[in-house]
Image: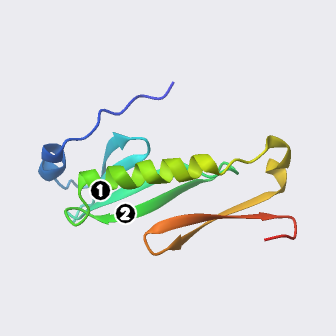
Amino acid sequence: MPRLATPLSDAQVKRAKAGAKLVKLFDGHGLYLEVQPSGAKFWRFRYRQANGKENTIAFGPYPEVSLADAGTSVRRLDAYFSTVLIPSSNASRLDGKVCARSNTPSVKLRWNGSS
């Protein structure tokens, strides 16, 4: 069973320090703050495509993108991805791709010859 992440607070995000290696502070539902050794902080969202491959979406740097804004974006993406339902009988025929278009990704599904 996966370990549940304790939601981050704004104070924790502000206090996050760079280390010798990349540091990831998880907020839950796939959202995490990536603190690079240089001190730069970026919001990332990790999810699985319908074909089982893992992908990551970058929301932007902190403090330009706040914790609240990143959380709102994750909820919108969760709602969007939950509307893309794929019957299990057709899953082997699926070619799922995620294409970044401005700040909101869209999922392109292609079924054997049709777009």
- Which residue sits at x=80%, y=42%? 88
| Residue at numbered disc 2 | 59
For the view shown, which residue lies furthest in the bottom direction?
102
Please state if 73 lies on the left or on the right of 52 as rendered.
Answer: left
Q: Is residue 3 above or below residue 49?
A: above
- Nearer to the camera, 107 or 35: 107
Residue 114: give x, y in percent of width and height: 84, 70
- Nearer to the camera, 52 or 90: 90
Residue 108: give x, y in percent of width and height: 67, 66
- Quadrant into which the C terminus falls: bottom right
For the view shown, which residue lies furthest in the top direction?
1
| Residue at numbered disc 1 | 69
Label 1 crowding class (10 Å Cα cut-off): few <14, some 14-19, many 20+? Answer: few
The amino acid type, in three-letter code, at marker 2 is: Phe
> Is residue 21 shown to the viewer in this render?
no
Residue 25: give x, y in percent of width and height: 29, 45
The amino acid type, in three-letter code, at marker 1 is: Asp
Q: Are marks 2 and 1 in contact (CB under 8 Å)?
A: yes
> Counting residues from the N terminus, which is met first, the one under dot 2 or under dot 1?
2
- Which residue sits at x=66%, y=48%? 52
- Nearer to the camera, 44 or 17: 44
Judged by depth in the image, the label closer to the viewer, 2 or 1, is 1
